[in-house]
Image (cartoon, coloured by chain):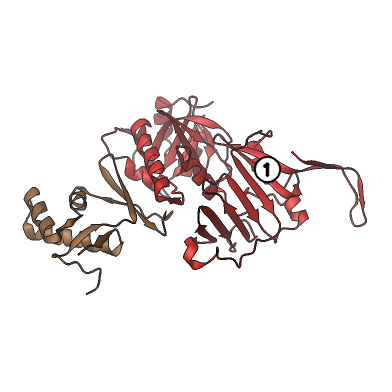
Chain colours: A red, B brown
Amino acid sequence: MDRIKLGWQFKPWLGIIPCMTLSHSKYYHVAGITIKVSSDRAMGTETFHPKLSAFETKPAARPDVLLHHHFFLPDTRTDIFIPENMIYKKFSWEIYRKHTDWYYKFIPSTSTDSAYTVYAVFNDRHTRGSVYTTEIDEKTYASGRFTSLTLSNTDKMLLSRLMSDRHGGMLHCNGIKTADGCLLLTGPSGTGKTTLSRMLAANGYTFIGDDVMLLSGQGDRFYAHGLWCHGSQPVTSPGTFPLQGILFLEQHTGSRITPLPPSENRIIPLLSAFMKPVLPKEGWQQSFDFLESVTRAVPCYRVRFNLSGDITNLFTAIWRPDT
Amino acid sequence: MNRNTVDTQAVYAVSPDIISREIEGELIILPFQSGVGNIEDDMYTLNATGKTVWERLNGRDSLEEIIASVSREFDAPGQQIKNDIVSLIQTLLEKQMIIRTC
């Protein structure tokens, strides 16, 4: 790993600048995937948002994903960013495909966190990527507190794609840690995922993920993984947890937790919560395999609850609180 | 004739631009555009009758033959079955999940 150590420096407008240690690469670990992020420029301790520091790891000899930041633009006048190659366009994102490579263009809107236009190119499996931008100067890069390794508004697209190749996926849900693993709370917006998560957190459980969690399976064992992306609640966790159950929430006048046996349809609500990656046809067979294995092996429950808080007693009767 | 107009004499088949999988007895259908699955919420499922019709879209039997076959299988008034199937085919055509082969 390259490391540049600056000694004491004198700058007319700042006076003495204390010694800083900068590097050109950092390593992050999420859901069993090690990502090396390297750069043409030195990274500071505040290049990435503090919430990512929990995912930072020591250098790995063979990272799973190599991502490099460049501060120039490739020639966009080529035959890549043309309508015939466009496969997706929504909000701030455009995705193009040429041969086996994937090309991303992120043009921020006023509602996004990141304020910079970014281009990126990835190989087919998204294990090698280059990010290009000309809008981030050295000072901003060193202390920009970027919330995304790709310098865009989110890493969800990249992570969901990576998980799809690893018998896994991304779920729109909250994560709740118990004494023995993790529960995932799913349901349409407004169902009460955050409300229930807070109720449970006040009763000995740990709220570990807001709005999104990663899942993976190994044989008949399934795991939930935290990530640095989140919804309105800044709740993240770098951990990996045995998956104890997926809970489909419904607001109701009463409170009840009902196991859903394999004979009862679970695939529909699971599909509703599944954050679909951008994949070619053959890739989707893998995702369907994964979803099918989840319905076979992961306990699922329907949870009906009101705001009285009674539901927490039902939880503690089934799953031991974390604390 | 509008290509999305249902013709009971026509033969229809599942589009090559979709992928489907039966999971837990539900038929899940995912349309594709430009060779990749869309990350919008564009997954569809079919109920039992719909699945029965879908399985008969083999590119050989006319829609009229399919309607007759399904009518024999389900205990429901023939006209109702026909109306339901035509409505389904209309929807599948509009969403480009099936194609007319002849």
The image quarter containing residue A24 is: top right
Whole-percent x and y of residue B69?
A: 9, 53
Residue B86, quarter of the rendered image: bottom left
| Secondary element type, mark 1 | helix
Position of A33 with respect to B4 (left or right) is right
Camera sees residue A69? yes
Q: Hey, what amino acid is under mark 1?
A: Pro
As drawn, A213 above or below B97: above
Place of residue A8 in the rendered image (x, y in percent of width and height, measured from the top left):
91, 44
Side of A13 where A135 appears, left or right: left
Q: In this view, does A114 lie to the left or right of B80?
A: right
Number of numbered labels in the structure image: 1
**Residue ID at (67%, 61%):** A73
Q: In this view, does A96 lie above or below A55?
A: below
What residue is at 49 percent from the left and 41 percent from the top?
Answer: A163
Residue named by callout 1: A50
Outermost residue on the bottom side: it is: B1
User: Where residue B85 sits: x, y (%)?
Assistant: 16, 58
Seen at 55% across and 65% down, the residue is A79
Which residue occupies the extreme front position in the image? A99
- The local crowd at label 1, few if under 14, some if 14 to 19, many if 20 or more residues have their Cα within 10 Å, is some
Q: What chain does badge 1 belong to?
A: A
Q: In which quarter of the image is the N terminus of chain A?
A: top right
Quarter of the image with the C terminus of chain A is top right
Answer yes or no: is residue A303 visible. Answer: no
Percent of width and height locating residue A67: 63, 46
